[in-house]
Image: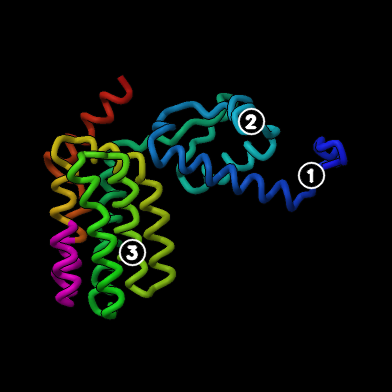
Amino acid sequence: MGQDGAMSSRPPSPGNEKKRSETLRETIEELIAVGELSPGDPLDETVLANRFGVSRTPIREALIQLASAGLVEMRPRKGALVAQIGPQRLIEMFDVMGEIEAMCARLAARRMTADDHRRLLEAHRACQASRDAGDANAYYYLNEIFHRTIYGLGCNGFLNEEAIKLHRRLGPYRRLQLRVRDRIATSYDEHEGIVEALLAGDAGLAAERARDHVVVQGQRFADLMASLSRQSG
């Protein structure tokens, strides 16, 4: 800035532009994950640039990064939109997420220390107040912390990164699940079972319960599809 507080007229350096686009990517990703931007919503570069007070260039770069992660769909001559995942693809993604969660839980059960037990219980108990209040938004964030805690306890950096990546990509759909009647209470009870298995060091049971907690089949999938229909209607 100059002495009068105005922004410098010098063009931003390539390094600053890259950092700005990465920050915007993280911001837009968060808006998608928490449901403020829903599957199928258009992502107009001009609207976003005005919203964040930047030029269209870093917005475009951020959208390209999100497209490479599968969160945004870039359509030639039509612009970008939040990626929509078809029912069959969604089942497949939750199946993979279930196996990743199972692997994380299996490794965590084998490798946890006494201090890790304390961290796990803290993450689990933090979800209780939002469960009791029926607060889906608060539970969503605390649920994410709970799962990420287990990912970290597996002590496998690469697996941790991949788990977080897919967990975030499924964020809008996981959030919708929590709005289904009684799902928050059921989710917490399932967490309880996972925690019990982890604290007991039962790797097989922890993996089984972690997988079952994530995979969407039968009525749970029907509920998720109904939630998506209401959202797009």
Label drawn at residue 12: 1
Against 230, residue 100 (above or below) is below
Q: Residue at x 20, y 67 (%)?
A: 207
Label 3 element class: helix
Mark nearer the viewer, 3 or 2 = 3
The verdict on residue 204 being magenta is: yes
Across and down, in percent, residue 75 comes to 53, 30
Residue named by callout 2: 49
As drawn, is 118 to the left or to the right of 46? left
Q: Are marks 3 and 2 in contact (CB under 8 Å)?
A: no
Label drawn at residue 149: 3
Mark 3 is on which residue type? Answer: Thr
Mark 1 is on which residue type? Answer: Pro
Q: Main secondary structure of the magenta part?
A: helix
Real-space Cα separation, disc 1 to disc 2, in angstroms: 16 Å
Q: Residue at x 51, y 39 (%)?
A: 28
Mark 2 is on which residue type? Answer: Ala
Q: Residues within 10 Å of mark 2 (few under 14, many from 20)?
A: some
The verdict on residue 210 being magenta is: no
Across and down, in percent, residue 100 comes to 30, 62
Real-space Cα separation, disc 3 to disc 2, in angstroms: 35 Å
Q: Magenta segment range?
A: 191-209
The quadrant holding residue 104 is bottom left
